[in-house]
Structures are given as structure tokens and as C-alpha cells.
Amino acid sequence: MRRLIAAACGVCCWISTAAADSTIQFKIDGIELGNIPHIEIKPGYYGEIAMDAAMLDLGQGPVPVYLYQLPEYKTSKQLLLTTVVEKKRVFSPIVVLLTDRYEPAAVVSGDISLHRVNQAEVSSTIPITILPNHRYMLITTNPKILGKQLSYKRMNTGIVKMFDGNNTQYVPVTTGMREENVVIADSGRLVLSAPHQDY
């Protein structure tokens, strides 16, 4: 005879239910980006990247600007930029790829789609295609959405212990869902995955 014994557990699954509109047009021309301190990204780098902000007006009012020097890739590569929820705050990045003369070459932006990576991390990842003429990566955000909330649902899962007299099995079951909110902030935790150099 099987007995079902409910056991408390902290397992959860995160599902995105809403995304903030990050569509915006920035004016980079005429801004002295060469005077902004930048952080160099090495080939093969993986981990958090520092966010040292400069406040600039890119045509939509003052916004934080973070400037990074990219590796000199000889072929097209794909970087992965992940924004991580931390202390109920998240940064919504807009990426502007620049040439060696700080001329805009491409803009990468999109909705935040949060998902659970592990027990402690909820994040959103965007792919960024880097071409050989891309030398810098400027990261900023849409000032119109700062302070707004991004909502998603947290699916709580419990563990049911099933014992038949000989063996014990633990089976996950959904115990309910609740809505969670995070604030869109002007800075946050960013993780970058950069490909190794090609030769």
C-alpha cells in the first residue's frame, strides 16, 4: 500500500509573463565617446562585467552609458549578454555596436523574457552578433521604463514522498502560482559570454 507524504520544498520554476518595451532611437553622432572610460573584454571571457556608468544625453534625456572594448575577431561571432534579477531589480539593456571611430554599426535590443537558471538565479539572455568591424559595445537602456515594474509568474513546486513499504520516491508536484514583480533599474548584474579568438 502506497502512502503519500507531503514534504516542504523550496523548488520553483520561473515563467515570464510580461516584457517591457525597450524600443527607442538614440542619437550617438556628435557625442565624444572616446572620452568615456571603457572596459576591455578579452576573447573567451565568461562572467560578470563591471558597470561603470557615464551619464549622457543620447537624445532621450540623461541615461547611463556603459562602454566596452570588444576583442578583434576576424570572423562573425556571437556573444551572449545576460541580465540577472538581483534584489528584485533588473537592468533592461540596449546594445549599440560601434566601429573603431565610435560610429554606430548596429543596435541590439529586445523584450526581457525572464527564466529560471537555477535555484538562486532568474535572468534573461540576448544574443549579440559581432562582426569584424565592431570594436566597441555601448550598453544603455530606455529611460522611459526606468522605475517601472516587470511582472512574471513564479510556479511553486512541492515534493511528495511516496512510500510503498519498501521503496521511497520523491515526486515534484505543482502547488500553485503567484505573480512576482521586479523594478527596471538603471544598473544591475550583467553576465557576458565572449567566444575565443579565431586565428
Image (cartoon, rainbow, N blue to C red):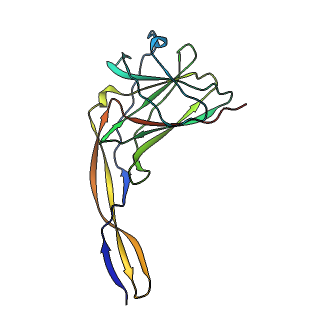
Please name the residue shown 46% across and 17% down the image. 37
Q: Quadrant of residue 112?
A: top left
Q: Residue furthest right?
A: 199
Expressed as whole percent of the image width and height from the top left, the position of residue 121 reads 40, 48
Up the image or down, 151 lies above or below 184; here it is below
Name the residue nearer the viewer: 137 or 37.
Answer: 37
Task: Count up the numbered dots.
Answer: 0
72 relative position to 58: left or right? right
Name the residue nearer the viewer: 170 or 113.
Answer: 170
Please name the residue shown 32% across and 26% down the image. 143
Please name the residue shown 43% across and 87% down the image. 166
Expressed as whole percent of the image width and height from the top left, the position of residue 85 reads 36, 42
Expressed as whole percent of the image width and height from the top left, the position of residue 127 reads 52, 38
Name the residue nearer the viewer: 27 or 95.
Answer: 95
Quadrant for the N terminus in the image: bottom left
Q: Quadrant of residue 56?
A: top left
Please name the residue shown 31% across and 78% down the image. 5
Up the image or down, 3 lies above or below 23; here it is below
Expressed as whole percent of the image width and height from the top left, the position of residue 169 reads 42, 77
Quadrant for the C terminus in the image: top right
Up the image or down, 167 lies above or below 135; here it is below
